[in-house]
Amino acid sequence: MFKFWGDGSQAAKDMVNAIAVRSTDNFNWTFIFILAVVFYVYWSEVKNKNTKAICAGFALYGVHWLYEIANAVIGHFFGYPLWSVSNASTTFILLIGVCWELSMMFSLAGIISWKMLPDDTSTMYFAKNGRKGINCRLVGAIEMALLFALFESFLAGTSNGSFIWVYKWWGVWPVFITTYVPFFLAANYVPDMEPKKRLRFLLCLWGTVALLLIVLIPAGII
């Protein structure tokens, strides 16, 4: 049921080769329902003036998009991306490695991660007997990253190719270290930045994402 590494199989390659990016063949109304849920969550945070939670959401989601763009570029130039989603597993594929349902989940993941932290984010875990301990934001990021990596290993083992790993050297541990840890570090640390620096970070992050999408999609690269 769980799959921990890519197998380089022809079956995996065939599923990737069959991916129809931004095709509406499998489109259905769950697309709208999921979008409504995301709007509800964000506007609830706006109404409650929970700026840090909103920043956590945008920070992780922006990093997520940079990774997805990079993954699609890898797929274009090297034959196969590091990860993919199959046609059978989704209603709409945004880029070769991310579907609508997955992307909307990541739009909320930063908020969830932030809300799971103690109210005092300077809290140190394992601080006893004179030891300084580890900040709760770092511990939380590692915990969430491990959870997501393990769940991705389950998705990679599904028969419909919810996640497809082609390369034999790519799997749970690379995903955990190079992908999910940075995602949740952004979610847990960006909200506590000084407001002006936080705004600059988010503007630069999302400006870069927008520029890459505007250039690379019409060019046929992603």
Image (cartoon, grey):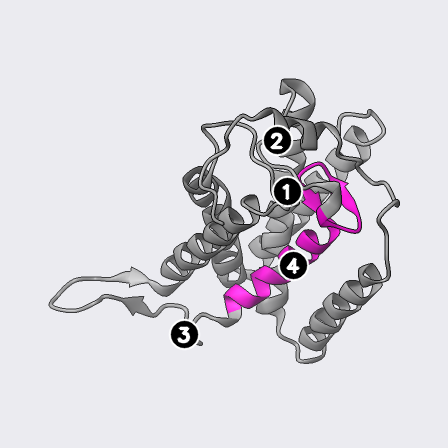
Image x and y of residue 214, in percent: 81, 35
- Mark 2, mark 4: which one is toward the viewer? 2
Local packing at callout 2 (Cα closer than 10 Å; few below 14, some 14-19, many 20+) is some
How far apart are labels 4 and 3 at the CA level? 26 Å
CA distance for labels 1 and 4? 18 Å
Q: Is residue 148 above or below residue 48?
A: above
The residue that label 2 is drawn on is: 12
Give the main secondary structure, helix, strand or loop, of the magenta stretch: helix
Q: Is residue 181 magenta?
A: no
Disc 3 to disc 2, C-alpha distance: 45 Å
For the point 70% across and 72% down, the residue is: 41
Q: Quadrant of the C terminus?
A: top right
Q: Amino acid at mark 4?
A: Met
Mark 4 or 3: the one toward you: 4
Distance from the alpha carbon under mark 2 to that under mark 4: 24 Å
> In percent of the image, x 67 and y 36: which residue is there?
69
> Depth-wise, is mark 3 or mark 2 nearer the camera?
2
Q: Residue furthest bottom?
A: 48
The earlier-in-sequence mark between 2 and 4 is 2
Residue type indicated by callout 1: Gly
Q: SS of the residue at dot 3?
A: loop
Q: Earlier in the sequence, mark 4 or mark 3?
A: 4
Q: Amino acid at mark 2?
A: Ala
99 within the magenta span? yes
Q: Is residue 6 visible?
A: yes
Residue 165, image x, y percentages: 56, 35
Q: Which residue is mark 3?
A: 120
State if disc 2 and disc 3 touch (CB < 8 Å). no
